[in-house]
Every structure is written in structure tokens, then in C-alpha cells.
Image (cartoon, helix red, strand yellow):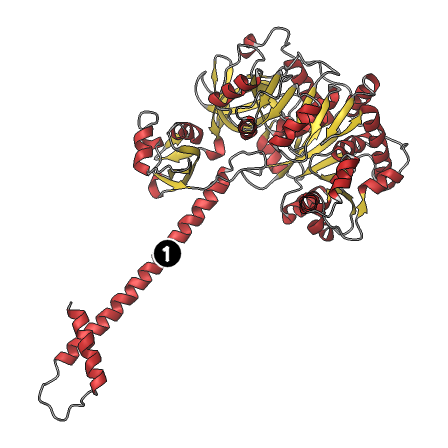
Amino acid sequence: MARAHYPAGVPDEIELPTVPLTDLLDRAVAAFPKRHAIDFIGQKTSYEELSELVKKTASMLSLAGVKKGDVVAAILPNCPQHVALAYATWSLGATLAEHNPLAKTSELIAQLDNHGGKIVVGWEKTLTDLADHLPGRTIFAVNLTAALPKRSQMLLKLPIKAAKAQKKKMRGRVPDHVYSFEKMVASAPASFVGETPGMDDVAVYLHTGGTTGVPKAVCLTHMNLMSNYTQVITWLHEFKRGEETIASILPFFHAFGMMLSLVLSIGLGATQDILPSFDPKMLIAANKRHPITFFGGVPPMYEKILAEIGDDPNPFTKLRYSVSGAMALLPELAAQWEEKTDSLVIEGYGMTESSPVLSGSPVSPARRPSTLGLPFPSVDAKVVNPDNIEEEMPLGEVGELLVRGPNVFVGYLNQPEETAATLIDGEWLRTGDLVRWDDGFLVMADRRKEMIIRSGFNVYPSQVEEAVRSMPGIRDVAVVGMPDGSAGEAVVAALVLEPGASIDLENVRKWTQDKLSNYSMPKSIAVFDELPRSQLGKVMRRSVREQLDDLELQAGQWRKKLSETGDELRERASEFRHRMDSSREKPAGNANAPQPDQSARDQSASSDDTCDK
């Protein structure tokens, strides 16, 4: 049914790849040696030059002891060195382990210990704190400024405040036992003894789980990634090899960014406008040097780019297609983007465990905004009862999405139980997403783990968020479930308000009463300055719950403190009244009774007067 909506020219199945990722660069170099492969803030690198950099990097790694089956850890922002490191690692038949350079030191140490890689290539600023915690490893530090144009490097050396601030953002001090990546690569020969990876060899460890739990290392093979590359170029079949320019702003350590920049761009012989971090101004400047034809991003990026453009003319005059993923793209935002850029934006859906893209909207008027689109060629999908995955749900009813295909991962590193629970019979991936079929298109209900159970009813946070977000004065919202006694969970809405807005729970419930069932309406609200988000901009509901827990704990502590203070005041008042009553009961004419001095008499009179009032 889904394949009936495929665009013309898109087959039901792909031809399975037979060559590893290294073949992508080899073919691009052979076909487009002089074409710019990379533009990094103005510094241009041709495919021929990139190939030379890859060879010298592979030579350096080989001299450091890297061989087939070993692990090389990359802890880097987006930069040319990152691209070279990836292809150098694969050229040796080794596995690239990707890490977020902004992650906490403790998290990075745990990840590195899990895969055991002895070679670490990291950003200087990350290694400032991390390097001393990695005994027994060979560490190379990447200097981001070394990849800049010579003029920019000279400007950063000027003794002025702006230059010093920019340099501080890009560089960091590292211990003496850390090697300079750039110096070691420069001194390495451009020849090495490589080994062609097998299709079933693990190409990458990507870490996932940041929004729902402890990060896991996802094992993706050359077959997985090459299959997904083939699926993407089959779906977006109007790509022109050697003519595209792609904005590389998504983190390479994330599956979306890796596929777009390290795989798709190289395979297409495209030019990449690489930015170390997302910055709308820098993106527009990069577009002036190499006009972007294809853009991939997440909804918050689209919002910020549109805000930066404002009423100015459209700077992206060569843009044909954009892809949005990681979270729902609101129809009004999609319409604003298309109107401003005069280009088509489609939505894709996937996860790290699927390399990552599983489905997408057709690149045609048949697309359906706010859906997950159609399963990609060679991807089988079914919607099942989450409590009994042998039972498929009737069409139109919500269930958990299970998928299989050549792009589905082979397991989590060193976590056999987690792998068995996620990869059913070694092939069906439990996505954890609750969806339904709608005329062949997949429609998201919510994450299974984030579904709220209220008095026995299922509440889908995304549906509640959509209803609440439509209320004037609300800029952003995240809905979570919080413990609520016998009712199970309470529906709680964390709100970010527009400047000057004032909203209470009664307003929210009135607004949503015609949009939601009674049990789905928020039972309470909390106002946040900003919602916690991942580096891609995705709202982290788990963090929202943790913050709400903290607020409840603080409120409980204050209630306890106020209660204790009240008890103490009541006890002191009772004691005081008792003393006053005892004082009044003494016989008036007893000459033997001790007489208070005048100051005490005055104090007692004053206290009696206060109590009487």
C-alpha cells in the first residue's frame, strides 16, 4: 500500500551495495579531482587535496599502531580534519567511534572504556579536561584554527579583544603527552598499507540514548551505511553528482549529520559548506561563497535561519530541496520556509539504529506534511501491539513501529540483552515509536516510553503538545507524565511563554477542552524560561521530568519547613499564653510573693497588651 505512493522512478527495492564506504571517496576523487570537496569558513579543499590528507592521516594512524578491527575515537566538532579522520580510519579497516565533544568528561570516559579504543583524536578544548583521564592511550589534539584560511589565522593572532575571544572559543590547552594532529599528519608519508573493509565489518560506533537514558554504542556496518546512502539517493533521485552544494551544519557525531556530510556529500561529489557549530550568520556567509542546493536540518534551525533573514531577500537562490528530521516540522514553519526560499522541504524519519533514515515524504506534490512519510525502498514496516509484538494492529490503529532492512544495525556494543530486546529475531528493529498507518503513510503518535497512562487511558504527549502549542501566548511546550497516586500519572505541561504573556491552568484547560479528551488535558502546568534540548534542538522530556521533580522536591521541603515553623510558633504561643495565664492567677495581696522589678513589670504589661489586641 505504501509503495503505491512512491514517486515515479523510485523502485520498491534497492540493489544491495557490494563496496565499502571508502569507495565513495575513491570515485569522487577520480571523477571530480579539482572540485571543492570542503569549504570551511572560507578555506577550500579540493577532492584531490582531501584524498592526500586522508592518505597522510591513515599513514599517521598506521604508524601509531592502528590496524584492521581496531577502534579510533573521534571527539571532534565538524571540521575538515574530522572528514579526513573518518576515511583514513576506514581505509585501514578500522572502526570509527564518534563522540560528542561537548559531553561531560565522565560520560566520555565511560564510552571510551566501553569500546576500548587506544587511539583518541580530539578537539583541544575537550582534551583540556579529558586527556589526563585516559592513561594508556595515544592522543592527538586537533587545532580548529589550523583549518582556517591563512588570513583568518593571522587575524586570530592580533592582540585585540575580539580576536582573543574567538581564539578562546576554538582552542584549548592540552597536556604535554598529547600529540598535535596537524604536525603529525604533516610529517607522515602519503603512503600506507591499507586493508579493504568487509561489508559486514563495523564502520562506526554512534552513541545514542541521550534523550531517554544512558547512551549506548550502536554498531553500524559498511553494509548498513552504504545501504542507507543508496536508499537516500534513490529516493532523492534528482541529485546531480558533481553539482550539489550541501550545508554541513548537523553534528558529524550524530547519525543525521554523519549520513548527510560524511557519506552522502562525498558520494555525490558535492561541495560541503562545513561549520563547526550552527550559526545562521555564518551559514548565509558560506552560501555566498558556494550557493547551497540542498539543506538538511532540524526545525529549530529552520526557525533561526528565517529569523536571521527577516525581511531581507532570499539568500538561498540555488536551493532546491531541504530535509527536516529529528522532530516534527510544524506545517506553518514548512510553509514559511518554502515561501521564503522558493524550495521544497520534506520530512524524513529515522533513528541511529537504522543508519539513520527509514522513511520520508515523496519529493513531489504527493507529500503529506506532518507525517513520517513512506518507508524507504527495501524497508519493511509493520505496526504491532506493543504488549504482544506478534499481533499486528488493524489499519488506522496506533501501535509500535517495527522495521527491517539492510540499513538496520547489527546490535549494541557489549549489551547483548539490550540488543536482543531491540532487534527481534536479529532483524526486526523495535523503534519504540507509536504510529499508525494512514493510506500508506506513517503518522507518529508518540514515543512508547514517553506515553502517559492516566487512569488506564493512553495519553500521547505529542498530541497534547500540539493542542496546547496552538494557544496564543505559548511559545513552546513539553508534556510529561508525573506520578499521581492511584490515577497512575498526571499530565503536566511545561510552558515557555511569549514575552508579556500570562497564562494559568484554567486558561489552558479551557483552550484544550474541545481538542482533547478530559483525561488528556493537563492537570498542572509549570512555566520554564527555556525547555532543555539536545544539541540538535530536540526537547528532552526526560530532563523536563527531572526538573519538575526538583521543583516538587523544593516545594515539599518548603512546605515541610513552613509546617515545622508553624508548629514551633504555635508551641511557643501556647507556652506564652500558659505563662500569662499563670501570672494572672497569682493572689493579688500576697506580700511574700516575689515582686518583679519595674522594667520587667513594664515588659509584662507591653506583652499583655500585644496579646490582647
Q: Residue at x 81, y 44 (%)?
A: 180
Point 44% across, 17% down: residue: 396
> Is 133 drawn above or below residue 417 in the view shown?
below
Can you see residue 569?
Answer: yes
Farthest bottom residue?
592
Question: 84 or 378, which is in the foreground?
Answer: 84
User: Is 59 or 496 nearer to us in this picture?
Assistant: 496
- Circle 1 crowding by C-alpha within 10 Å: few under 14, some 14–19, many from 20: few
Q: Which residue is mark 1?
A: 558
The location of residue 408, given as percent across then percent down, is: 64, 25
Query: Observer-nearest residue: 57 or 504?
Result: 504
Badge count:
1
Q: Nearer the viewer, residue 363 or 426?
A: 363
Residue located at (58% from left, 13% from top): 363
Q: Residue furthest top?
A: 8
Secondary structure under badge 1? helix
Q: Quadrant of the C terminus?
A: bottom left
Give the answer, above or below, for where 48 lies relative to 416. above
Q: Position of residue 274 (x, y in %)?
A: 70, 30
Find residue 438 and report its horizontal and vertical position in percent. Answer: 47, 15
Please state the horizontal and vertical placement of residue 478, each as a whole percent of the image: 45, 35
Left or right of residue 452, residue 572 in this image: left
Q: Is residue 253 left or right of residue 432?
A: right
Q: Amino acid at mark 1?
A: Trp
The residue under the point 48% across, 39% down is 531
Residue 117: in sight, yes or no? no
